[in-house]
Image (cartoon, rainbow, N blue to C red):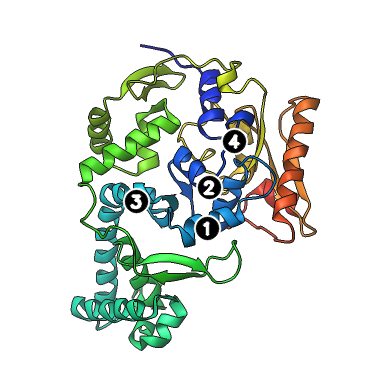
Amino acid sequence: MRAIGAAERRARLGVRHRLAGGARAGSAEEVAESLVALHGTDPATVFLAVGARLAGTAGPVADVERALYEDRSLVRMHGMRHTVFVLPAALAPAVQASTTDPAAVRERASLLQHLAAGSDFDAAWLAETERLVLAELSARGEATGAELGRAVPVLRSTYVYGKGTRQEGVQSVASRVLRVLGMEGRIVRGRPRGGWTSSQFRWARPAGPRPGEGPGPAAGRAELIGRWLRACGPATEADLKWWTGWKVTDVRAAHAAVGALPVTVDEGTGFVLPDDLDPVDAGSAGAGAEPWAALLPALDPTAMGWQGRDWYQDPEHRAALYDRSGNIGPTVWWDGRIVGGWAQRPDGEIATRLLADVGTAAGRAVDAEAERLAGWIGDVRVTPRFRTPLERELGG
């Protein structure tokens, strides 16, 4: 089998993830297409991830907001591993069929189980509540959860969660109902209240394909795997199973559907698309001859792209860069490796710390990226939703 070592994998990463100097993107859509999906659990991550990959110093805010809320060329939805992502609108039907629909079935069953255990509400009550919410959104165009609660009072109903356990408590049905409708593709997240770091989204009816109008589950999995291998191959079966959240049998069937070929990587066997076997020279012009620096946000899709990360991250740095749940914080990169972390201080300064000795040139390049980031963030203050030891220390 063809062997693809860590250096070549890092060269591929720099170009395909739009981080090498000559590979920077011209739009938010180009970034999303290259990365397949941007983590959207923390709204700021989307903007910071795009900003790190755009050419120039103007910043990504206007471009991302245009793509999300005006052109609708990017959509925010639940996807892989039950996580919210921002992804190209054209890919949304494949993600819905392959990943979100099965999770939505489980989410609806869980809600009905909790309602039965902690209230008098049943499936008929839930269906009527959903009908009223959808009718209200059709009439209004868009609304926040609070606005929907005022317009549809039954949405403010409560139930007892975890009855008879230490977790017992009264909860509102609103967030659970909206979550199920969103996962089923019957409502979508729109423009938030406040600025680009806000997570208080408005809800609306979808303008694109409805559930059932896209590919079947198997075709959706094949499309998603094909796109992901183009961006992240070579990857091991463990990487693919972790990133998608699918059963291993589904991963293997999708492999077969796209004709993925095995290659040797440091961890064992990886997979690439059949037309992706040509060598990539880490020092070639196509791979970006100049070393590159980047400041990537917490939960960035490159840092979170693979389950096995030793080829781009020193295991000894894990304690500083991750929280206890495995969420990675803001990272400093030099030529394909994570070499440190960063944070924004209360006065707006972007503070960095290198955890590896990478030389004076690398330090200057990192400082330049920090200055570029501070320039477009301006007066906005960004605190990651999942804070990590080094980020807390640097942030003050």
Q: Nearer the viewer, mark 1 or mark 3?
A: 1
Mark 3 neighbour density, 10 Å: few (under 14) some (14–19) many (20 or more): many
Give the residue drawn at x 37%, y 48%: 80
Q: Nearer the viewer, mark 3 or mark 2?
A: 2
Give the residue drawn at x 65%, y 42%: 320
The three-letter amino acid code for the residue at tag 3 is: Ala
Mark 1 neighbour density, 10 Å: few (under 14) some (14–19) many (20 or more): some
Image quadrant where one finds the N terminus:
top left
Residue hosting label 3: 92
Where disc 1 sits, the SS reads: helix
The three-letter amino acid code for the residue at tag 4 is: Arg
Give the residue drawn at x 45%, y 66%: 190
Sequence-earlier tag: 1 or 3: 1
The three-letter amino acid code for the residue at tag 1 is: Arg
Where disc 4 sits, the SS reads: loop
The image position of residue 333, as x and y in percent, is 65, 34
Mark 2 neighbour density, 10 Å: few (under 14) some (14–19) many (20 or more): many
| Marker disc for residue 28 | 2
Residue hosting label 4: 24
The image position of residue 261, as x and y in percent, is 31, 20
Residue hosting label 1: 66
Where disc 2 sits, the SS reads: helix
* Marks 1 and 2 close (CB-CB < 8 Å): yes
Q: Please, is residue 109 above or below residue 334 in the view?
A: below
Sequence-earlier tag: 3 or 2: 2
| Marker disc for residue 151 | none
The three-letter amino acid code for the residue at tag 2 is: Ala
